[in-house]
Image: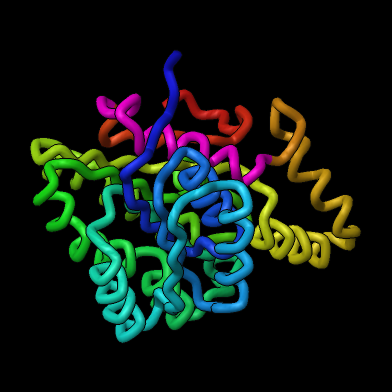
C-alpha cells in the first residue's frame, strides 16, 4: 500500500492558526510530521494547537509573530532554530485588502509587498541552509489562481502574488541539485475568513446578500462548490513526501476546475 508518511519530519507553517494554513498544518500532522505554527494571535494559535493535538500524536509548537514586521521575522527565525531545522516550509499569508487598481494608494502597494513577498524571501533565506545540511527540503508557497487569471476587485493580490511564481521557478533551479524541491499552489475559492471578507465587499458593491455573493462565487466552479482548507493540505502533504520527490518548480491549481486557461 502506498501511504504518505511524514514521520520524523518537521514542518514550519505560516498563517496557520486558521484558514488554509491551519488546514495544511492539520493534514501534515495527521501524516506524522511535527509542526510549528505561526500567526499573530496567540489565542488562535493555542486553539489551533489543541485542535491538531486532538487528531494527531505529534509535537505541535507555535510562534507568535506578525510577518509584516522585520523584528517579528527575526524573532520567529530564532524560535524556529531553537526547535530544529524544518524539513518542510509551507508559506502562506492573509491577503491584502480588496479593491480596484485606481482605488489603491502607493502605501497599499508597499504593504502588499511587505505582506506577500518580503516574508517569503526572508524566511526562505534563513531556512534553506538547514535544508542544505540535511540534503533534503520541501518548500511550498501558497499563491492564487489570480496569478493565472486576474480576479476583479483584488488588484493587489493579482499583481504581487505573481512574484511568488518567479520565486518558485528560480529556487527550483538553484536548490534542486541540493535535494530541495520548491513548488507553488494556486488555490481557487476556499472556505476561509478571507473569502467571506471578499464576498461581503462584493455584496455591498452589487447590492446583494452575503449568501447570494457566495453562490455567485461557486457558480463558475465545475465541481459546484467551494474548496476546503484540508484539500490544500492533501496536496502539500503529497509534495512534502517522498511520493512528490520529482515535482519541482510546479505551479499547481487547486480550484475545482475553475480556471479556463490551458497553460
Residue at the limit of the structure toward the bottom, as seen here: 71
Q: How is the image coloured?
A: rainbow
Q: Residue at x 61, y 72 (%)?
A: 44
Judge by depth and name the residue closer to the eye, 159 or 30: 30
Q: Quadrant of residue 4?
A: top left
- Position of residue 124 relative to residue 175, above or below, is below
Tell me, yes or no, if residue 162 can be seen here. Answer: no
Residue 204, image x, y percentages: 82, 67
Magenta stretch bounds:
227-246
Quarter in which the C terminus is drawn: top left
Q: Residue at x 58, y 60 (%)?
A: 154
Residue 123, image x, y percentages: 27, 65
Residue 171 as seen in the image, left or right of residue 112: left
Quarter in which the N terminus is drawn: top left
Judge by depth and name the residue closer to the eye, 82 or 123: 82
Q: Residue at x 88, y 53 (%)?
A: 211
Residue 213 as seen in the image, left or right of residue 96: right
Residue 84, image x, y percentages: 25, 61
- Position of residue 120 relative to residue 135, above or below, is below
Amino acid at each position: 500500500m502506498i501511504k504518505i508518511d511524514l514521520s520524523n519530519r518537521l514542518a514550519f507553517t505560516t498563517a496557520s492558526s486558521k484558514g488554509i494554513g491551519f488546514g495544511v498544518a492539520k493534514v501534515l500532522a495527521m501524516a506524522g510530521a511535527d509542526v510549528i505554527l505561526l500567526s499573530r494571535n496567540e489565542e488562535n494559535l493555542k486553539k489551533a494547537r489543541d485542535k491538531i493535538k486532538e487528531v494527531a500524536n505529534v509535537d505541535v509548537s507555535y510562534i507568535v509573530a506578525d510577518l509584516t514586521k522585520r523584528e517579528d521575522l527575526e524573532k520567529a527565525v530564532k524560535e524556529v532554530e531553537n526547535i530544529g531545522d524544518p524539513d518542510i516550509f509551507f508559506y502562506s499569508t492573509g491577503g491584502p485588502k480588496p479593491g480596484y487598481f485606481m482605488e489603491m494608494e502607493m502605501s497599499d502597494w508597499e504593504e502588499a509587498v511587505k505582506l506577500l513577498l518580503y516574508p517569503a524571501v526572508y524566511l526562505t533565506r534563513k531556512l534553506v541552509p538547514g535544508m542544505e545540511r540535511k540534503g533534503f527540503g520541501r518548500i511550498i508557497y501558497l499563491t492564487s489562481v489570480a496569478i493565472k487569471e486576474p480576479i476583479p476587485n483584488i488588484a493587489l493580490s493579482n499583481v504581487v502574488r505573481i512574484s511568488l511564481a518567479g520565486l518558485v521557478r528560480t529556487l527550483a533551479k538553484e536548490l534542486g541539485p541540493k535535494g530541495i524541491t520548491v513548488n507553488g499552489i494556486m488555490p481557487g475559492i476556499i472556505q476561509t475568513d478571507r473569502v467571506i471578507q471578499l464576498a461581503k465587499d462584493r455584496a455591498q458593491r452589487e447590492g446583494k446578500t452575503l449568501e447570494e455573493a457566495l453562490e455567485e462565487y461557486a457558480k463558475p466552479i465545475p465541481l459546484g462548490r467551494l474548496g476546503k482548507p484540508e484539500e490544500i493540505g492533501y496536496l502539500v502533504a503529497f509534495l512534502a513526501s517522498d511520493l512528490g520527490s520529482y515535482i519541482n518548480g510546479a505551479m499547481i491549481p487547486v480550484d475545482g476546475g475553475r480556471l479556463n486557461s490551458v497553460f
